[in-house]
Amino acid sequence: MGLTDYTSLLKITGRVVSHTTPRLLWKFVRNFGLRNLKNMSAFERRMKNGEPFFPAFMMISVTEACNLACSGCWVSKGGKMSLTPEQLDGIITQSKSQGSYFFGILGGEPLMYRGLFEVLEKHPDCYFQIFTNATLITPELAQRMRKLGNVTPLISIEGLQEESDRRRGKDDVYERTLRGLRACRDAKLIFGAAASICKSNFDELVSRQHLENLAHEGAAFMWYYIYRPVGADAHPENALTKEQVRQLRQFIVEQRRNAPLIIIDVYWGADGKAICPGATGMSHHISPSGYVEFCPPLQMAMEKVNADGSNLVEICRDSQFLADLRQLTSSTTRGCILMEAPDKLADFLEAHGGFETTSRATFLAELKRMHHVPGHDMHDEAIPEKSPLYRMLQKRYFFGFGAYG
């Protein structure tokens, strides 16, 4: 590791340690760190040896309900679908039986899901990342997450003041989000921020100043996504250009050397080549209707978890739909098939007879209207990692598991 990387890592580690509690830090190290090391090794072994398939991580959207109405969101506005607590508990239990102890909890807005913390409380050996807009996080709620000890909020910030209000469909969203973020900080939680980068928020969020501001507010990490123009209110004109995708990748690579917080993405490997977590089998998604999907924005599936979630392992092991979709994606692009080949994806879904998994039941029609927009596959212009630390982590955990040949 270079001196710059080493110094930056020490500063980040020191800040996180000083801002949290020994109990929360131990939960993070044990549940997220050590158990994940074992889980990833087991996943790699299964893929290498052709053993029964189960993803390394499961993303779970617990509800369609949300208190905002964001443009470009794939979740059905006004949707009422939700998993039952019994299904959520069973999904977690089934995943644990396969060695998986880390879960992304999504919505809608997951903090609107009744009984969420009661279910998470049953699994103190797991670690849960809650994807939230943070507007519902009060000091009391933050203290409840602190009591659980195995929850990290991932707070979505889609722009600064004006952009947040425009994208979110409500007023004063940015300040309300900051209040929730500060409640997490005051409760000494380990938390991070996230952003779906598009044309309208690029200059505000792809900046060193934004990273500095987040670190000042106590965030331990920043997770960058690329905007996907899907859903009933897609706004494809807001998708990044090819040059902006290159600029985003360059920014991430440069800032990782000395950023004041950890920068995360799941799009590129150590050599800069694109990666799709769904194509590698690293993660799949469970919708609020209980269907097991390829990824969150691809809202069609064939198999559904039962009343207590006890058939999840069987579904992942036996689903020809998911296996064929992994194969189609990896043979089509290293990037996002939803963005780069929506026509091919639509043909696949119709041929397989996939079920629509949302309340609005218009995903296939939306998919047929989509046009190609640049994804994160940069082909011959790939930008390798410069940080030795991140190169090591990505070679160990994100090299594709043979999905791309």
Image (cartoon, rainbow, N blue to C red):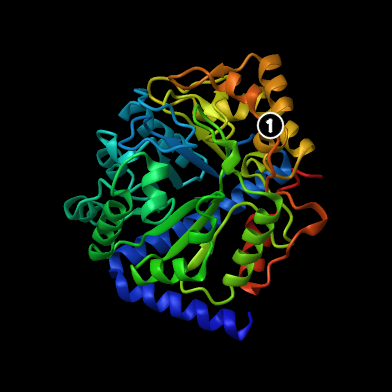
Q: Quadrant of residue 289?
A: top left
Residue at point 16%, 52% (across, down): 140
Query: Can you give x and y, in whole percent of width and height, for residue 342 in the image?
Result: 69, 29
**Which residue is tagged 1?**
371
Tell me the quarter of the image containing the C terminus: top right
Identify whether 268 is placed above or below 323. Answer: below
91 relative position to 344: left or right = left
Residue at left offset 35%, top offset 34%: 89
Whole-percent x and y of residue 157? 41, 53
Residues 77 and 357: in front is 77
Taking the view exactly as shown, the residue that stands out farthest to the left is 140
The answer to whether 369 is drawn above or below residue 13 in the figure is above
Q: Report whether residue 126 is seen.
A: no
Is residue 66 or residue 175 the one in the foreground?
175
| For residue 115, side relative to residue 260 (left or right) | left
Q: SS at mark 1?
A: loop
Residue 370, image x and y in percent? 64, 29
Q: Residue at x 79, y 36 (%)?
A: 331
Q: Residue at x 74, y 55 (%)?
A: 273
* Amino acid tagged 1: His
Asked which quadrant contains residue 184, the reply is bottom left
| Position above or below: 67 against 12 | above
Regarding residue 114, the answer to whether it shows in the image is yes
Image x and y of residue 128, in percent: 39, 48
